[in-house]
Amino acid sequence: MKAILGGTFNPPHKGHIGAALKAADEIGIDRVHLMPCKLAPHKSVGVSESHRVKMIELCAHNNDRLIPELIELTLPSPSYTVKTLRALKEKSDDTICFFIGADSLYNLDKWYEWEHLLDYCHLVVMRRDDEKFSPPPAIQAWLDCHVANDINVIHAKPAGHVVLTNTPLFSVSSTEIRDVLAGAATPEKAGTPNSPNVALASLWLEENVREYISEHQLYKS
Ligand code: ATP
């Protein structure tokens, strides 16, 4: 069984890692693959693909439960999860558990061929906010047909189910981190009492990722 968290990882943060590892614990999987996508034009803020890959590799370097999965970067643009899942299945018949945050689930019906996602994987949903779980009606109707009441079903079946996990809340997004870092005047100032927001953003970054961002002057406005 292969657990995959797809994302822009621009930059990767402890919310990605914390939530994914907790979700993995919940469903009884040891390792999580971090799979960067090609950036859609509306998300192409910040840094190059190679920087995003390097930051993912740094996260994996810190934690042997994390593994970079770079297949999506080798596929034609733009990235479509359903096409990536197909490509993964052509490489290996492993059962795929594809992790997404609740915010992504709420927008799932905007994804390319979204009704076919469950042909190739189980979806594992992580909490993204403090609110009661409340997807839009179309998504709720779809969930009613696919939510697994017994978590063991994802170990017994190769695809087709959705698991709503009880991961703790990790209140952070890459957007917030980018915004804060863009406001930092100089790298020397980062983390000083004069720039508490930078210090706060840094708390959500793995130390080697924070150093990498600082060294390469990423996310400066
Ligand atoms: P951005 O702010 O740039 O949109 P993001 O922080 O949402 O980025 P992505 O790389 O786009 O991060 O997210 C990849 C996946 O991880 C998505 O399914 C998203 O919902 C999920 N995710 C991101 N941050 C968290 C978090 N703090 N807790 C749980 N899930 C998260």
Image (spheres, rainbow, N blue to C red):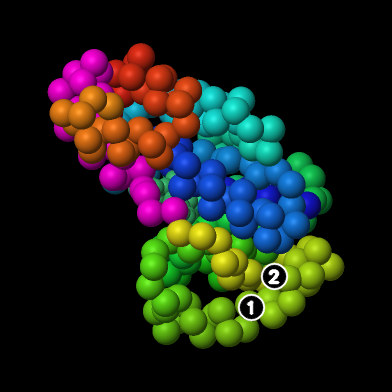
Dot 1: within a 10 Å radius of its alpha carbon, few (fewer than 14), some, or many (20 or more) residues? some
At 37% from the left and 49% from the top, the residue drawn is 172
Residue at numbered disc 2: 160
User: Which quarter of the picture shows residue 75?
Assistant: top right
At 61% from the left and 49% from the top, the residue drawn is 21
| Magenta segment includes 178 | yes
Query: In the depicted view, which residue is nearer to us: 180 or 3?
Result: 180
The image position of residue 92, as x and y in percent, is 79, 45
Q: Is residue 36 above or below residue 211?
A: below
Q: Is residue 76 above or below residue 49?
A: below
Residue at numbered disc 1: 146
Q: Secondary structure at mark 2?
A: loop
Q: Residue furthest right?
A: 156
Q: Amino acid at mark 2?
A: Gly
Q: Is residue 217 above or below residue 164?
A: above
Asked if labels 1 and 2 touch by Cβ distance under 8 angstroms, the answer is yes
